[in-house]
Image (cartoon, rainbow, N blue to C red):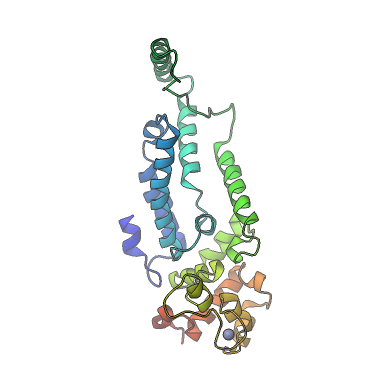
Amino acid sequence: MRSLTTITGSTWGTCFAWARRIYTAVVRPTMTYAAPVWYATTSTGKGKKWMQRELAKIQNEGLRRVLGAYRATSIPVLENEAQVPPIELVLDKTVLDHQRRQQGTTGQQTVENFCRRIRNNLQRRQRQRPNTLERPNHQPGQGENTWRTLQEKWKQKWESYRRTHVDGPPAAADLKAKEILKMRSQLPRRDTTMATLVRSECIGLRAFLHKRRVPGFDNPACDCGGGRQTAKHTIMFCTKWDRAALFEAAGSQDYRKMVSTARGIRAITRWMISCGILEQFNLYRYQ
Ligand SMILES: [Zn+2]
């Protein structure tokens, strides 16, 4: 995780594709190392929930680094924008894959026989008490594709998030994984960050700062008098900015299309940075 922090700032450092690869190839495997032992054998739901929560904290911090997102960005959005599944689903998959590899092997048989004997002994001694040695709640089915199972569960979670965020930011819209990765893969670091801020609407403009109760932002309205100062307002409607070059570069004036295609998002991030709309990017203006 420290390596990710060292090489990735919000406006400098490794591009999205590399930062994502470092997270999925280095940070996450370290977190899930030997999960079939410590995660699968945790018998109580409480212990599992605690582990999931602690690991999710680390993953969320990692994804914020990969995307350049603010803390206020919701977790399903982080996961979807980075195309990194929720950590508890990754843990389940790791355990299932391990169980499948072990199924039918002599070692597995020995362990199972041993566990059965302990379980029987315990049950004999504590007839009135509930069984304290739980079996894993999910056994891999014959021919089950654990990657597909993970994807399906993730999709269900994502859809339930979207149902409660119908008027959400562009990042809450439905976009195929391939399209998200394609859209982001071409962007340099500063544009990755800007793309995240625009797509999540967690961005240093008045509407967001007011909502987060940042001192000095009592009013969400833009100076131009045209309504709340959101990313969409700034990009599409604000009279303070000239956007002929933006629309030309984007090849479209349809906001939904602009924020969800590689060409559109690139045009937006370049335009936002060159206009100096957010102070944190001003060192990096395109000339
Ligand atoms: Zn305005």
User: Does residue 97 lie above or below 103 as drawn?
Assistant: below
Q: Nearer the viewer, residue 234 or 243?
A: 234
Give the quarter of the figure containing the N terminus. Answer: bottom left
Relative horizontal placement of residue 22, taking residue 241 as reference (left or right): left
User: Does residue 168 lie above or below 22 as drawn?
Assistant: below
Name the residue at 53% across, 55% down.
76
Residue 35 image point, x, y percent: 39, 36
Residue 36 image point, x, y percent: 41, 32
Relative horizontal placement of residue 45, taking residue 242 as reference (left or right): left
Q: Is residue 173 visible?
A: yes
Q: Nearer the viewer, residue 122 or 178?
A: 122
Relative horizontal placement of residue 238, taking residue 102 as reference (left or right): right
Name the residue at 57% across, 65% down.
183
Q: So how many labels did they put on this image?
A: 0
- Residue 279 image-quadrant placement: bottom left
Name the residue at 51% across, 49% down.
85
Residue 217 image point, x, y percent: 47, 79
Relative horizontal placement of residue 252, taking residue 74 as reference (left or right): right
- Residue 259 image-quadrant placement: bottom right
User: Does residue 37 lie above or below 27 as drawn?
Assistant: above
Residue 238 image point, x, y percent: 60, 85
Name the residue at 42% across, 52% down.
59
- Residue 268 image-quadrant placement: bottom right
User: Does residue 91 lie above or below 280 as drawn?
Assistant: above
Q: Is residue 187 visible?
A: no
Quadrant of picture, ligand 1: bottom right
